[in-house]
Amino acid sequence: MTDILISGAGVAGPTLAYWLARNGFRPTVVERSQGLRSSGNPVDVRGPAFPVAEQMGILPALREHQTRAKAMRVLGIDGKPLARVPMGAQRAGSQEVELPRGELASVLYAAARDHAEFLFDETITGLHQDEGGVDVTFDRAGPRRFDLVIGADGLHSTTRRLVFGPEADFVRHMGVYVATLPLGEPAREPDEILMYNTPGRLLSIHPANGDALAAFIFRGPAIPGFDHRDMDQHKKIVLDAYAGIGWRVPELLDRVRTATDLYFDSVSQVRLPAWSTGRVALVGDAAACLSLFGEGSSLAMSAGYTLAATLAEAPHDVAFARYETEHRKLVEPKQRNVSRAAGLIVPKTRLGIGVRNLAARVGGTL
Ligand SMILES: Cc1cc2nc3c(=O)[nH]c(=O)nc-3n(C[C@H](O)[C@H](O)[C@H](O)COP(=O)(O)OP(=O)(O)OC[C@H]3O[C@@H](n4cnc5c(N)ncnc54)[C@H](O)[C@@H]3O)c2cc1C
């Protein structure tokens, strides 16, 4: 039987593990976190991911965790409502589900856990491949040999760094940063996402599915010395970026000051000339992160499905090439669209905000 190691139990990893097992492979998944966190930013299961979820039989579980957002409420500079734009996920018969990323990862893990070995609190530390397999060393477990290794370990992929080269060669800052903060209380508007913009800055409040989530999304060039793991640095960057802004910003900045669970990162894309080398391949954000403005979670699921299907049909070298050809067709147009999406969500100028708001008023309702 073919032994396949997957690094990362986010969205792509457990989807891939599920479909590899269904296709007769023996998957092992290592996940750096101690367990799966059941929180996080809302993501979507739609487009090519919807039939994958349907075939996995997980749609009822996904819908149980569906967020409550029915519309986006665009606010003016004075914080007063300007436009209400209905969202698709809540329509009857809708082929999309919006839910927190952590809940999506948990549902996918629940579907895969009886068909794969999962090792939490573990990470790959070294990889050496030869003609017959890949020797892998781990942080805690003893070394093991696998037939194939797949990096599903996200934007800051360790597998990519160990096999393809340093992150700086492949990760592009898109001129935007994002911070998210769970507010630990229900949203005041339980079924609307509030969007408050000033030039180059967005504060949104998402009702999620219980506890509201604040997101600070703002424009800025690459910050020298930026460390995606340094929360004190992140707090300072957010406090500086939103200083002097109105509406609920001062109150939420106070929450940022005392937060212990602030998420912060550069909004980035990943572009690699090839997604595999020898017996190692990449899926999801590790291979082709779109940034938060795309459909990264749906594409991560569909990538896992496609990779498992191609491996079931052909030897690994042919399968990796087919998977890449097929999946790039979905990813590359979406990567190109990201700047346009960013322009709508975080317009750079007052004029840009005005034009966006006018379009929202014409297309939506008040
Ligand atoms: C703020 C924000 C908002 C977003 N909004 C949306 C949205 O609205 N719609 C949408 O479709 N997408 C959205 N996305 C993108 C989406 O979350 C990602 O595209 C998706 O999660 C990618 O899945 P993945 O499995 O490739 O990576 P991830 O979900 O990042 O999973 C990677 C996993 O690998 C683990 N890992 C990392 N390093 C190691 C290691 N060394 N060893 C072992 N495990 C490791 C991590 O702990 C994690 O569990 C958003 C992202 C962000 C940050």
Image (tube, rainbow, N blue to C red):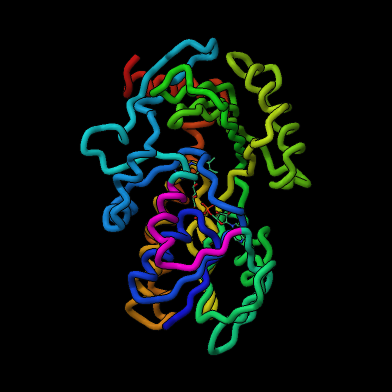
Locate the C terminus by quadrant.
Answer: top left
* Rendering coords of residue 324 (x, y %): 43, 68
* Whether residue 273 can be seen here: yes
Which residue is nearer to you in this view: 89 or 122? 122
The outermost residue toward the left is: 93
Q: Quadrant of residue 318?
A: bottom left
Across the whole image, how many numbered discs are drawn on residues?
0
Seen in the image, is 65 located left or right of residue 59?
right
Q: Is residue 110 magenta?
A: yes
* Rendering coords of residue 151 (x, y %): 54, 66
Residue that appears at 46% across and 54% down: 11
Q: Quadrant of residue 112?
A: bottom left
* Rendering coords of residue 334 (x, y %): 42, 50
Seen in the image, is 199 located left or right of residue 353?
right
* Rendering coords of residue 238 (x, y %): 69, 30
Residue that appears at 71% across and 47% down: 229
Residue that appears at 64% across and 64% down: 123
Q: Quadrant of residue 236?
A: top right
Question: What is the span of residues highlighted in magenta in the rendered image?
Answer: 104-120
The relative height of residue 290 versus residue 308 in the rendered view (above or below) is above
Which residue is nearer to you in this view: 196 or 22? 22
The relative height of residue 86 versus residue 337 in the rendered view (above or below) is above
Which residue is nearer to you in this view: 255 or 268? 255
* Whether residue 326 can be seen here: no
The outermost residue toward the bottom is: 131
